[in-house]
Image (cartoon, rainbow, N blue to C red):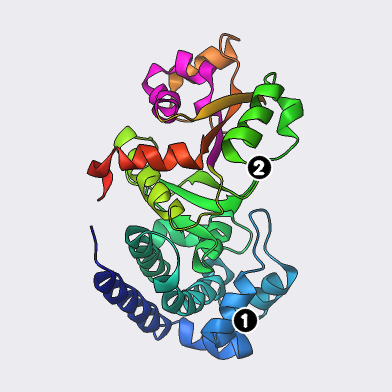
Amino acid sequence: MIAASEVRDRLALAYEFCQRALQEPPFPQIVARLGDHANPSTAFQLLTQVTMYASPDALRALCASVEVNPEDHAAERALLMLASQHASTQVPALPVSERVKELFAEEFEFFANPGPVWMPQLGKDNVRFREAARIATLRRFPAGQFQWELDGVPRSWLWKTQSSMKLLRHVLLKMGGFSPTWEFHTNARRKNKGILTEKQACLSFYRGAKSMEKQPNIRAFMSTSWFYSESAAQISPHLAWLRTLPQSGGAQIFELGLAAEDSGFLIGSVERRKAYEEGRYHPRIACVLWARKDFIAWATQHPEYDL
């Protein structure tokens, strides 16, 4: 268990990492051109407009107007670091576990030094930049292998699943309503990139559950992917734990229809791709709904994941 004082020290260090990086070329020139947006709180406010699907026109225009070399994405990276400086002062008061707060500090440090592999992915129109912007503005919460964002169960799922009454009963009786929920997403920068491991998933779930304890309005853990479906477990038995782990803690899984070809099931397995091309595998999307009470109870039973 990490102490609150250690977290504050780590956040202060992340702030300094960003400060030092902003003093290195080409950032002084970029910051000078940012005008009012060179202020950490103003940069933070601008990035709050970044959604899961798009960056606002104002941000796109600002980056285009101040860039020295567009391929470096230095304007976007400067805004991420400035916003992170503002966010680092807000993190200690967040109603989440101390470990999640520490992981925010790790993310802020990454923005200061993303490295050559990640730098090209931090452009304003890239999904990874949009994820980073939501982390820097405290709307996407790092938990290790998975991250979460505030969301709710779409009512359209009632028409997508063949178990609509079961889904409705679970939402109304177990969860107490459609929203708010926390939707968990795979972390693109996770350890063991390219695979998902049960231990790392448990660590993420534990951090999420301990954070959920601090926010009594959150109704459930929610996650949607092809790898939760029964068809995925059948074609790739090594992924079966992705279903059985939450189910062992009381979660319900609902199939939502066929998965799009770009949803990721063709990545990472020659056998899965071959089965799909031969018509032996029909990938489906499934959602996990893990009601608050059950999710927290699971974490209480697994203190070994308090890492």
- The front one of 269 and 203 is 203
Can residue 201 be seen in this snapshot?
Answer: no
Q: Quadrant of residue 3?
A: bottom left
- The front one of 104 and 27 is 104
Residue 219 in the image: x percent, y percent? Answer: 56, 46
Q: Is residue 173 above or below residue 117?
A: above
- The front one of 265 and 177 is 177
Residue 236 in the image: x percent, y percent? Answer: 43, 18
Check whether the beta carbons of the residues at disc 1 and disc 2 lie within 8 A of each other: no
Q: Is residue 279 above or below residue 87?
A: above
Tell me the SS state at disc 2.
Answer: loop
Residue 225, disc: none
Tell me the SS state at disc 1.
Answer: helix
**N-terminal label among 1 and 2:** 1
| Residue placed under numbered mark 1 in the picture | 66
Label 1 to label 2: alpha-carbon separation: 46 Å
- Name the residue at 55% across, 51% down: 218
Q: Amino acid at mark 2?
A: Gly
| Residue placed under numbered mark 2 in the picture | 177
The magenta span reads 221-248
Residue 45 in the image: x percent, y percent? Answer: 62, 76
Q: Quadrant of residue 35?
A: bottom right
* Label 2 CA crowd tier, 10 Å (few <14, some 14–19, many 20+): some
